[in-house]
Image: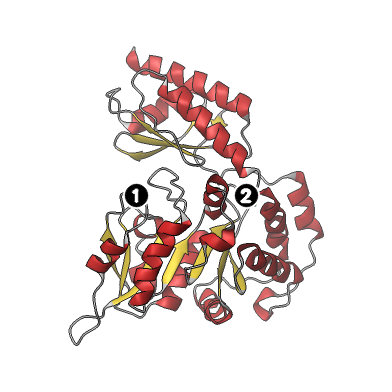
C-alpha cells in the first residue's frame, strides 16, 4: 500500500467522526438554526480567544471572504509572493473582490514592518491605496515555517498605524502554536481576522473556520452567502469538525515524524532536506540532477506519494494517518527510488 504524504488533507475521518456525523443534531444553518454548526463556531471562537467565528466549506473561501470584507475594490493587498492567497487561489482577490496585489519577498515567511512600509501606498486622487495586509502561519510554500507571534505583532502594528487591517491565513495555525508552544489567543491577538482549517492536520473531512470580532463575522456571513457558501443542514459535516478540535495536541506527533522523515531523507546521497519546523518536509533534488516531477514519479512507483512544488522541490506532509513505522518505511522506499533514478 502506498504511503500518502502528498498533504495533510488526505486524512480519512475516524470512526468517531463518522458516528458524530450520523448522529448530528441539525437545522438550517442559513437561518442560523443548526445547533451543531453553532456549537462548532462558538467552540472555535473560544479556542482562539476571539468574539465570533463562521464555519466555511474551505480555507480558500474563508480567505477570500476576509479579503472581500476588509478591502474595497481597486485597493492593494500587501502579501508575501509565496503566500497561498497569492499563488494558489486562482487570483481570487482580483476575480472576486476587485483587489490588486502588491507582493513582497518575505524571506523569513512574514513581511517585516520595513517591508510593509515600503509596499504601503497612500490613497490619493490617482491611487486607491493599500487596503489589506495578509499573513500566513504556518507558511506552506516556505516549508511549513512556524511564524512567531512577535513577528506577526510587529508587522500588524505597522499596518494598523496606517489604518490597514490584517488577515491571517492560519490554515495550519495550530501547527505553529504547538511547534512554538504558544497559546492560539496570543498568536492571533493582533490580527483583525483569522482563518484555520479543520480538514488538514486536525483530520476533519471538510471545513474551515473564519474568525474575528462580531462585526467582522456578521459581514463575513453575508459574503459567505454571496460566494455560494451558505449551507443548510451542515451539522452533518460540522460534527466531525468539533472532534477535530480535540486533535490539536497530537500535532506534535506529526512534527516528530516530519523531523525523522527529513533526517532520514537527508542521509540519502543526492537529497538535501532542511530540518522542518512543523509537518511539511521539503526535499531538494538539484544535487541529484533530477527534476521534481521525475523524483515524485519514482517515489510513487516505490510506494510513497508526494508532490512537486518547484523544478527541483518536492513536498511531503506528515499527518495523523501515518505513524512512525510508515515514516521508516517511507525513508527506505525513497532510498530505493533514488537508486532507481541513479541506474
Q: CA distance from mark 2 to mark 1?
A: 25 Å
- The mark tally for this picture is 2
Residue receiving disc 1 = 108
Q: Nearer the viewer, residue 108 or 272?
A: 108
On screen, residue 206 versus residue 336, left or right, reads: right
Quadrant the N terminus occupies = top right
- Label 1: how many Cα within 10 Å (few below 14, some 14–19, many 20+): few
- Label 2: how many Cα within 10 Å (few below 14, some 14–19, many 20+): many
On screen, residue 239 versus residue 273, left or right, reads: right
Taking 284 as reference, is 156 above or below it? below
Q: Nearer the viewer, residue 319 or 179?
A: 179
Q: Position of residue 342 (x, y in %)?
A: 33, 15
Q: Position of residue 140 (x, y in %)?
A: 43, 48
Determine the image quadrant of residue 323: top right
Element at label 1: loop
Residue receiving disc 2 = 202
Amino acid at each position: 500500500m502506498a504511503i500518502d504524504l502528498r498533504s495533510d488533507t488526505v486524512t480519512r475521518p475516524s470512526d468517531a467522526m463518522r458516528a458524530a456525523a450520523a448522529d448530528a443534531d441539525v437545522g438550517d444553518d442559513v437561518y442560523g438554526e443548526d445547533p451543531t454548526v453553532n456549537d462548532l463556531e462558538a467552540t472555535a471562537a473560544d479556542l482562539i480567544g476571539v468574539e465570533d467565528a463562521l464555519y466555511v466549506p474551505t480555507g480558500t473561501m474563508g480567505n477570500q471572504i476576509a479579503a472581500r470584507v476588509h478591502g474595497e475594490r481597486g485597493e492593494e493587498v500587501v502579501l508575501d509572493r509565496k503566500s497561498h492567497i497569492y499563488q494558489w487561489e486562482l487570483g481570487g482577490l482580483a476575480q472576486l473582490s476587485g483587489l490588486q496585489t502588491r507582493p513582497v519577498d518575505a524571506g523569513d515567511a512574514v513581511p517585516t514592518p520595513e517591508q510593509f512600509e515600503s509596499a504601503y501606498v497612500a490613497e490619493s486622487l490617482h491611487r486607491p491605496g493599500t487596503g489589506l495586509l495578509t499573513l500566513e502561519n504556518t507558511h506552506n510554500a516556505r516549508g511549513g515555517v512556524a511564524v512567531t507571534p512577535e513577528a506577526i505583532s510587529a508587522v500588524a502594528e505597522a499596518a494598523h498605524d496606517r489604518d490597514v487591517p490584517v488577515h491571517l491565513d492560519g490554515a495550519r495555525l495550530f501547527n505553529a502554536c504547538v511547534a512554538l508552544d504558544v497559546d492560539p489567543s496570543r498568536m492571533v491577538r493582533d490580527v483583525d481576522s483569522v482563518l484555520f482549517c479543520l480538514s488538514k492536520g486536525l483530520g476533519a473531512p471538510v471545513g474551515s473556520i473564519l474568525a474575528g470580532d462580531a462585526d467582522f463575522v456578521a459581514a463575513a456571513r453575508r459574503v459567505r452567502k454571496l460566494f455560494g457558501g451558505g449551507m443548510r443542514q451542515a451539522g452533518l459535516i460540522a460534527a466531525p469538525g468539533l472532534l477535530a478540535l480535540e486533535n490539536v495536541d497530537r500535532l506534535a506527533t506529526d512534527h516528530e515524524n516530519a523531523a525523522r522523515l527529513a533526517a532520514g531523507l537527508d542521509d540519502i546521497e543526492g537529497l538535501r532536506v532542511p530540518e522542518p519546523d512543523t509537518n511539511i518536509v521539503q526535499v531538494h533534488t538539484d544535487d541529484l540532477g533530477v527534476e521534481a516531477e521525475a523524483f515524485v514519479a519514482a517515489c510513487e512507483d516505490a510506494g510513497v506519494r508526494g508532490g512537486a512544488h518547484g523544478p527541483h522541490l518536492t513536498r511531503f506532509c506528515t499527518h495523523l494517518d501515518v505513524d512512525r513505522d510508515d515514516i521508516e518505511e517511507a525513508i527506505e522506499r525513497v532510498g530505493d527510488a533514488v537508486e532507481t533514478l541513479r541506474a
